[in-house]
Image (cartoon, rainbow, N blue to C red):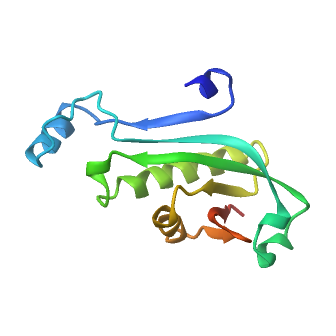
Amino acid sequence: MQHQAKGISRTFVAVPAGTEEVADYRVAGYGDIEETSILGYFALASAFLLADDLAPELAKRYPRQIPVTRLGRLAIRSDLHSQGLGRLLLADAISRSRNAALSVGSAGIFVDAKDHEAARFYAGYGFTACKDQALKLYLPMW
């Protein structure tokens, strides 16, 4: 919240859409989910990436410093993993990033994956590992 208040990043939060969705979660065994329960979230910020950090086949397309959107801390409630919410939040993050890039230049999205499992998640959606940094991944937008 401190970064958002300072204009450094914007955080987007997934909560149940309403009472019907809360009821569906309860039927599925999630008795503690309320309308205000945080199911997942992600943050977006502007950043620069050095072309030297990218894989050589990507680096040759760019100048030395590349304006990008940084996807920070995409997270899902632990008991909701592997149910598709992460995929939906990632799609929303990419869509928001691309829409912003239409007004303010951004060549792509990069993320610092928390661990190798998270890196595999992002790789499954087209992100590629940066040179010598398996947990730093990049997805070109154009």
Q: Position of residue 1 (x, y in %)?
A: 55, 25
Q: Is residue 83 shown left or right of residue 68?
A: left
Q: Is residue 38 shown left or right of residue 70?
A: left
For this orientation, the residue located farthest to the top is: 5
Q: Is residue 142 above or below residue 45?
A: below
Q: Residue at x 29, y 27 (%)?
A: 36
Q: Position of residue 48 (x, y in %)?
A: 79, 49
Q: Quadrant of the C terminus?
A: bottom right
Pick whichever, 75 or 96, lies toward us. 75
Pick whichever, 19 or 51, lies toward us. 51
For this orientation, the residue located farthest to the left is: 27
Q: Residue at x 78, y 73 (%)?
A: 58
For this orientation, the residue located farthest to the right is: 64
Q: Position of residue 40 (x, y in %)?
A: 39, 42
Q: Position of residue 57 (x, y in %)?
A: 79, 78
Q: Residue at x 31, y 61 (%)?
A: 82
Q: Name the quadrant containing residue 136.
A: bottom right
Q: Is residue 9 shown left or right of residue 115?
A: right
How many marks are shown on the rendered structure?
A: 0
Q: Residue at x 66, y 55 (%)?
A: 109
Q: Is residue 63 above or below residue 80?
A: below
Q: Is residue 51 above or below residue 58?
A: above
